[in-house]
Image (spheres, rainbow, N blue to C red):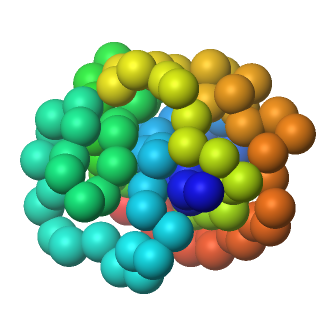
Amino acid sequence: MSQALIMDDPDAPMGVFTHWVLFNIPPGLTSLRENLPKAGSIPAVGMQGTNDFGRQGYGGPCPPGGRPHHYRFIIHALDTTLGLAPGSSKEELVEAMAGHTLAMGQLVGTYER
């Protein structure tokens, strides 16, 4: 069993922009500390995929000026630990999760400059 987290911005000008991909999160982990390393694998936390900035780890909100953007944090409870490598994309994660999601939740925040 594990958890997976995807953070994205559906309001990005070029389409949905992925800010964070985190998977193989231990099922008992209930919070994340600030300033996680940009490493592919973080002991006791999970593995980070590649975001749409082309980097591993969290990439914070940076919308163009104007209207607020919505930022979705989507968490999946899975019935397995995924066999993905660090640096995997959101698309690879979604494909690997197919048929393994037990439950999911979503938190949406807004941000504008």
Which image quarter: residue 25?
Answer: bottom left
Q: Which of 8 and 35 is in front in this view?
A: 35
Q: Residue at x 82, y 34 (%)?
A: 98
Q: In which quarter of the image is the C terminus?
A: bottom left
Q: Count numbered badges in the picture.
A: 0
User: Where residue 84 appears, x then y in whole percent?
Assistant: 50, 24
**The N terminus, quarter of image:** bottom right
From the viewer's perspective, is 26 left or right of 82?
left
Q: Where is residue 91 in the image (x, y as percent from the top left)?
A: 66, 22
Residue 106 is situated, as x and y percent measured from the top left of the image, at 70, 69
Task: Return the residue nearer the eye: 96 or 17.
Answer: 96
Residue 16 shows in this picture: yes
Furthest residue to the right? 99
The answer to whether residue 48 is above or below residue 69 is above
Q: Which residue is drawn at 48% across and 45% down?
A: 23
One can see residue 69 in this view:
no
Image location (x, y in percent) of residue 44 = 25, 60
Question: Which image quadrant is residue 69 in?
Answer: bottom right
Taking 7 as reference, is 19 left or right? left
On screen, residue 30 above or below 55: below
At a point 27% along the width and 24% down the height, the residue shown is 55
- Residue at 72% in and 54% down: 79
Q: Is residue 58 above or below residue 17?
A: below
Residue nearer the viewer, 38 or 63: 38
Outermost residue to the bottom: 30
Looking at the image, is 27 positioned above or below residue 69?
below
